[in-house]
Image (cartoon, grey):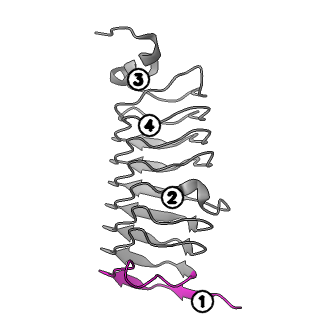
Amino acid sequence: MERTYIQDKKFEREDFTAAELPVADYENCVFLNCNLSSADLSKRVFIECEFNFCNLSTAKLPGTAFKNVKFKNCKLLGLHFENCDQFLFEVDFDNCFLHLCSFYKLKLKKTRFKNSNLSEVDFTGADLSNCLLDDCDLTGAKFENTVLEKADLRTARNYSIDPELNKIKKAKFSIHGIAGLLAKYDIEIE
C-alpha cells in the first residue's frame, strides 16, 4: 500500500480531535492554531514542518517521525517523545509548554529549548550534549544518567542536577544556577 505524501500545505485552525489527521508523510507543512490534543499521530512522518500555536497535549506518538520539526508557542503536555521513530529525530522548541513530557533515552544533541516550561520533564538517559536550554523553567525535571556535556544552561532556572549521576563536562551554568548543582548536599548558598 502506497503512503500518502503531502507537501507545502498549510493547516489552519483545524480540529484533529474530531477528524483524524490522515496517516501520511508531511513535508514542509505548517500547522497553525490546530488542535491535536489526544490525537493519534502514530506512524505519521513530519519532515521540516512547523507547529505554531498548536495543542498537541497527550497526543499518541508511537512510530511518529519528527525530522527537523519546529514547535513554537505550542502546548505539548504529557507527550512521550521516546515512543517516536528515532531515525533522524530532530526537534526545536520555542516558547512551548512541555510539562510532564518524556525524552527517556533519546538522542537530543544540539536540540534547542528556548523560553519554554519543561517542568516535570523526564530526561533520564537522554543525550543533551550541545543542547541549548535558554530561559527555560526546569522545575522538577528529572536528570539521571543524562549526558549534558557542552550543554548551555546559563539562563535555565529551577533545575536540580546531580553532577555525580550525570555527565556535565564543559556544560555551561550561570553563577545563579549553581545551587541547582549542589541541591543534594542540603547546604545554604548566599
Mark 2 residue type: Val
Span shown in magenta:
1-24
- Horizontal side, residue 11 vs residue 101: left or right: left
| Local SS, label 3 | helix
Report, in whole angstroms, how far the alpha carbon at label 1 lies from the one at label 3.
Answer: 47 Å
Report, in whole angstroms, how far the alpha carbon at label 2 lies from the one at label 3.
Answer: 26 Å
Q: Give the mark toward the camera: 1 or 4.
A: 4
Mark 4 residue type: Ala
Q: Which residue is mark 4?
A: 141
| Local SS, label 2 | strand
Which sits earlier in the primary sequence, circle 4 or circle 3? 4
| Local SS, label 4 | loop
Q: Where, by quadrant of the figure, is residue 90 drawn?
A: bottom right
Which sits earlier in the primary sequence, circle 1 or circle 3? 1
Say few, some or many: other residues with alpha carbon within 10 Å of mark 4 (under 14 / 14 to 19 / 20 or more).
Answer: many
**At which x and y percent is residue 29?**
46, 79
Report, in whole angstroms, how far the alpha carbon at label 2 lies from the one at label 1.
Answer: 23 Å
Q: Which residue is mark 3?
A: 180
Which sits earlier in the primary sequence, circle 1 or circle 4? 1
Report, in whole angstroms, how far the alpha carbon at label 4 lies from the one at label 3.
Answer: 11 Å
* 22 inside magenta stretch: yes
**At which x and y percent is residue 171?**
52, 29
Number of the label disc, if any, that sits on residue 91: 2
- Prevailing secondary structure class for the magenta stretch in the rendered image: loop
**At which x and y percent is residue 11?**
37, 82
**Farthest right residue in view:** 1
For the N terminus, give its image quadrant: bottom right
Number of the label disc, if any, that sits on residue 4: 1
Q: Where, by quadrant of the figure, is residue 18 drawn?
A: bottom left
